[in-house]
Amino acid sequence: MSATDGAHPAAPTTGAAAAPTPGAALAPTARYVPGSGETRRHVLIAIVNNRPGVLNRVASLMRARNFNIESLAVGHTENPDVSRMTITLRGDDYGVEQVGKQLYRLIDVLKVQDVTAERRIEHELALIKVRATNANRAEIVTIVELYKGRVVDLAADSVMVEATGTEDDIDRLVELVTPFGIRELVRTGSIVMLRGAQTVEFEEKV
Amino acid sequence: MTITKGPTGRHVPAAGTKAAKDVERARTQMLHEAKPRGRTRIGADVVLEALLRQGADVLFGYPGGVILPLYDVLGDYPDLRHVLVRHEQGAAHAADGYARATGRVGVCMGTSGPGATNLVTGLATAQLDSIPVVAITGNVPSALIGKDAFQEIDITGITLPMTKHNYLVRDADELPRVMAEAFHIARTGRPGPVHVDITKDALQQETTAPHPSEEEVAAGLPGFKPNFDGHPKQLRTAAREIDHAERPVILAGHGVLVAEAWDDLRAFAEKTQVPVAHTLLGIGGIDETHPLSYGYMGMHGWKHVNKAIQSADLLIALGMRFDDRVTGKVSTYAPGARIIHVDIDPSEIGKNVAVDVPIVGDVGRVLRALTPLVKARQREEREAYFAELAEWRRESERASWHGSGAWRDGLLSADFVIQRIGELTDHDATLIADVGQNQMWLARYAGFRRPNSHLSSGGLGTMGYSMPAGMGAALGRPDKETWAIAGDGGFQMTLQELATLVQDRIPVKVALFDNKKLGMIRQWQEIIYAGNYHSASLFGPDYLKLCEAYGIPAFRATTPDQVDDAIRAAQAVDGPALVWFEIAEEQNVFPMMPAGKGLSDLIEKWGGADE
C-alpha cells in the first residue's frame, strides 16, 4: 500500500462499466459503497516515529474512523528513532486500504504496509495461569510441552504457561487447558515479520 | 476605515511616518539580535519572531493566566497586530476567515483551560474545511501538567482528532522548530489547522535556539511528503476517458481554490468544453457568469446541476470529497458515470465513492499536465448536450426564484435580498455565510465571480461563523468589502464580537436575515417531521437598539423596496454596520434532498404553490 504513487491497486470498477448512450436508460446496477464488501482479517505493519503520544494518535484515529482493531502490538525496532506497530483488523479490502491512507495522514506515521497477502511469520505470546492439583499437574505439563509451551511458574494450586505461536496455535492450547480451569489469561497480539530476505522498512524519499 | 499597508504588505500603523520607521528598525533588530531591547530572549519571543518570519501580520487572541508571558512581550512586536476578540471561538473563526480570504495561514491564540476549549469549535471548523490555521495556547507550567492545576485541561488530547497535527512544547529550545513545522504543515499539501500548546515555563525560558530554514523543516518531517504531481500513467488514462465522454461534468471543489487553480480550471474546461458544477466550498473557482459554469450541486443545489450529474457518463472531480451533502445516497449516485478523482489527499480517494481513475496531486499541477493531453473540442460538437442542459437550467432557475422580492402576501423574500447584496457589491465583496437557510440562499443567489469571495463553514456547519470569520476576512483583504450573511440564530451565537468590530474598527457589514426562526430546523420539522415544531422559534432583541448600544450604525428593511437603500446605507458607513432584514418567517429553501435519499429525489415544493 503506498500513499503517494497515485495508483489505486484495489479499486473495483464502479456500477457502470460501459458508458450509456445519451438519453438511454441508465444501468440499473447500484454504485458500490466503499467498505460494504466482504470482510476478512488483515494484518498491517506501521512504522512510526518513536515519540510520546504516537500510539494515542493511531488508536484515536482508528476509533474516530470506526475501524475495528482486533489487536495492536507496538515496540522498539533496530532503529531507536522509530517504533513498529502490528495491527490486525477485519474489513473489506477497500475499507482496509482506507485505514492505511488515513494512517498516512498522521505526521508521525512513516510507512504502512498491508502484509495480508505476504508469506510471513505471525506470532504472539500468551501467559496462561491454569488451575492445577497434584493429581493433574503432570497431565497439564505434558499437554503444554506437546504444544511447545513452557511452564514458567509453579505454585501449589496453579501452573503458569508461556506459549508463543500463531493466533490459532494459542487458541488451540487455550482450548486444551480450559477444562483444568483458567485463572488468568493474557495475550500480546500478533507481531509479524516477512519470510525470506524481504523487510518492511521506511526509506526516506529524496 | 482604511488599513494602511507597508511595502511588504503588512499592516503598518501610520505608514511613512517616523513612528513607522522606528517600528521597522525595531523589527529588523528583533529579527537579527537574540536579545531585543536589552532583555533576554525568551520562549515567547521565539513564538512572535516565528510569526513574523512566516509573514503573519494579524493575530486574534484573548489573554489569560499562563499565556501572559507572551502578552508581556507582544508590545515589542509592533508589526504584529493583535485583535482582542470577545470569545476565543471568535479568534479561531477570525483566523479561519483570514486564511480563506487571503490563502495564507491565519493565527489565533488563547490561554489554557477554557481559553483553549473555546478555540476548539473554530479549529474543528478549519479542520473539516482544510483551512490553514495555527492556534497557539498557553498551558500550565510543565511541573503542574497532570495535576489538575487551575485552568489545566488535556487540550492536546482534545484537539488531536480535529487538527492536522498538534504539539505540546515544554522546552523553549524546541519552539523554533515546532513553530516552523506548524506553519509548514498547516499550509503544505492539504491545508489544515495545527495547534501548538506551550507550557508557561517554556514561554518564560531563556533560549538562543535559532529558527530553522524551510529546507531543514521539511527534512525534519520524513512522514510528511505530500504528492503534488499526478502520476503520468493516470493522467493519460484520464485524458482517454475525457476524450471519449459524451456527457462529462466537472465537479469543482475547494481544492481548486486552495491550489489557486481557477485559471487552470477555466483553460481545461474551455479546451474540453465540459460544463463545470461546483460544490459549496468550490464557489468562486469559476466565475458563475462563464458560459461553462453550470452551478451549485448537492442537497440544496440547483435541480439542473443534480440532474446533469445523475445523467453524466463521466464525472471529473477536482479537489472535492464526495461529501454526503453532495452525493446523497451513494448507491444511486450518478449511476451511469465513470469517475476521475483528483485530490492531493490520497485518503479522500475511494473514501466515500469508488472511483475509476484516481489521481493524487495538486489540482493546479494536475490540470496543467492534463490539459495538453486532452482533445480540443468545439462547443458545436456538444450541441445536443448543451441544449438539453440549457433547457433544464431555464426550468430549474425559474422554479424557485422570487424576482419581485416578495414571498407569500408580500413578505420579504430572502433569495431576493441575497441577489441584491451580490448585485450592489459588484459581485466582488467577500461574502461570509453563516449556517442554515442563509448559507444555502447565499450559495444559490449571490452570483460569485471572484475566487475566495465566498466563505462558508461547509464541513462542520458551525453556526455563529459568519461575523467572526468576517473580522479575519476584512483584515486580510481590506481592499474588498466584507459582508457577514447571518440568520438570527447564528448571529445570536457570536454577536459579542460586535464589540470587537467597534474597538478594532473592523469594517464588517452584517446582513442579518431575521425570520425569528431557526429556519432550517423549522424547514426540516415542517417537511420531514410532519410539522411537529419544537424549539424552532426564537426571540431576538431589537437589533437597531442593540447596535445603537454598541455604537454601530444599523438599518432595517422589511419590504422589497427598502432593500437597496438599506444595503447602500450600510455601504456608505466607514466602519462596521448592520442591516436588519425582516424576512418571511416560513420560507423554505428549495429544492431540497432529504437526508438518506438520492440526488434524483429532490423535493421542489411543499404546501402552497408560491414556494
Image (spheres, coloured by chain):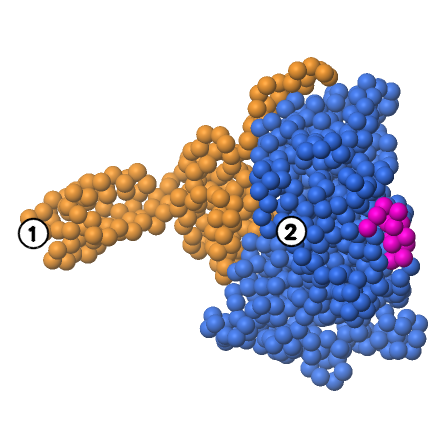
Q: Is residue B80 above or below residue A164?
A: below
Q: Is most of the magenta stretch helix, strand or loop?
A: helix
Q: Residue at coordinates 90% horizontally, 57% vertically from top-left?
A: B569
Q: Residue at coordinates 67% horizontally, 70% vertically from top-left?
A: B62
Q: Quadrant location of residue A40?
A: top left
Q: Quadrant of the N terminus of chain B?
A: bottom right
Side of B572 relative to B431 (left or right):
right
Q: Nearer the viewer, mark 2 or mark 1?
A: 2
Question: What's the amino acid at mark 1?
Answer: Asn
Query: CB of mark 2 within 8 Å of CB of mark 1?
Result: no
Which residue of the protein is positioned furthest toward the left in this rendering?
A135
Q: Is residue B351 above or below residue B211?
A: above
Question: What's the amino acid at mark 2?
Answer: Ser
Q: Quadrant of the C terminus of chain B?
A: top right
Q: Residue at coordinates 61% horizontally, 77% vertically from top-left?
A: B65
Q: Position of residue B461 (x, y in %)?
A: 65, 49
Numbered tag placed on residue B537 in the rendering:
2
Side of B155 relative to B62 (left or right):
left
Provide the secondary structure element on which disc 1 rests: loop
Which of B16/B125 is in front? B125
Q: Position of residue B172 (x, y in %)?
A: 61, 73
Is residue B32 highlighted in magenta? no
Numbered tag placed on residue B293 in the rendering:
none
Q: Is residue B219 above or below residue B360?
A: below
Find chain B in the image and tell me its colour.
blue
Find chain A in the image and tell me its colour.
orange
Question: What span is colored magenta in the figure?
Answer: B558-570
Q: Which residue is mark 1?
A: A134
Decide: few, some or many residues near mark 2? Use Cα within 10 Å; few <14, some 14-19, many ≥20.
Answer: some
Q: Position of residue B280 (x, y in %)?
A: 72, 42
Provide the secondary structure element on which disc 2 rests: loop
Q: Quadrant location of residue B418?
A: top right
